Image (spheres, grey):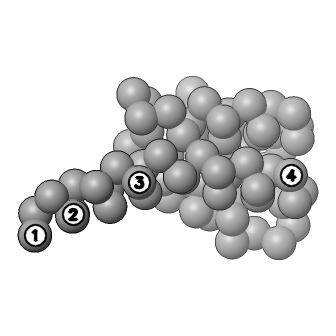
Amino acid sequence: MLLDFLRDDRTSESDLLLAAELAGDLTVINEELVEALLSILRRGDRPERVRGRAAISLGPILEHADTRLRGCR
């Protein structure tokens, strides 16, 4: 359902903000959600607040990946 909201051009700004926030939770994030958040970041036609929220939501998974990579060295 989050993925549908993030991909739909008709989703309201408030719903996009909420979906982007929820998508960043480590318990729900997956490759498809990461791709959807990255897509929002690349789109200049999305509101700046939504793009900012998408960037913030990617933070936990990027930190998790970095921590795992550092542990492999």
Left or right of residue 46: residue 60: left
Mark 2 sits on what residue? 69
Q: Nearer the viewer, residue 6 or 22?
A: 22
Position of 18 relative to 64 (above/below): above
Q: Amino acid at mark 1?
A: Arg
Is 45 placed above or below 13 here? below
Q: CA distance from mark 2 to mark 1?
A: 7 Å
The residue that disc 3 covers is 63
11 w.r.t. 27: above or below: below
x, y percent for residue 34: 48, 53
Quarter-of-image position of residue 13: top right
Q: Which label's residue is closer to the chain start, 2 or 4?
A: 4
Identify the image quadrant of residue 10: top right
Find out whether the residues at labels 2 and 1 contact each other: C-beta distance under 8 Å: yes
Work out whether mark 4 precedes mark 3 in sequence or the reverse, and give the earlier one. 4
Could you give the CA–CA distance between mark 1 and mark 4, rounded to whole angstroms? 37 Å
Q: Which residue is mark 4?
A: 49
How far from the left and from the top, in percent, is residue 15?
80, 31
Q: Which residue is mark 1?
A: 73
Q: Circles 2 and 3: CB distance less than 8 Å?
A: no
Task: From the viewer's side, name the closer residue of 5 and 20.
Answer: 20
Which sits earlier in the primary sequence, circle 3 or circle 1? 3
Of labels 1 and 4, earlier in sequence is 4
Q: Residues within 10 Å of mark 3 (few under 14, many from 20)?
A: few
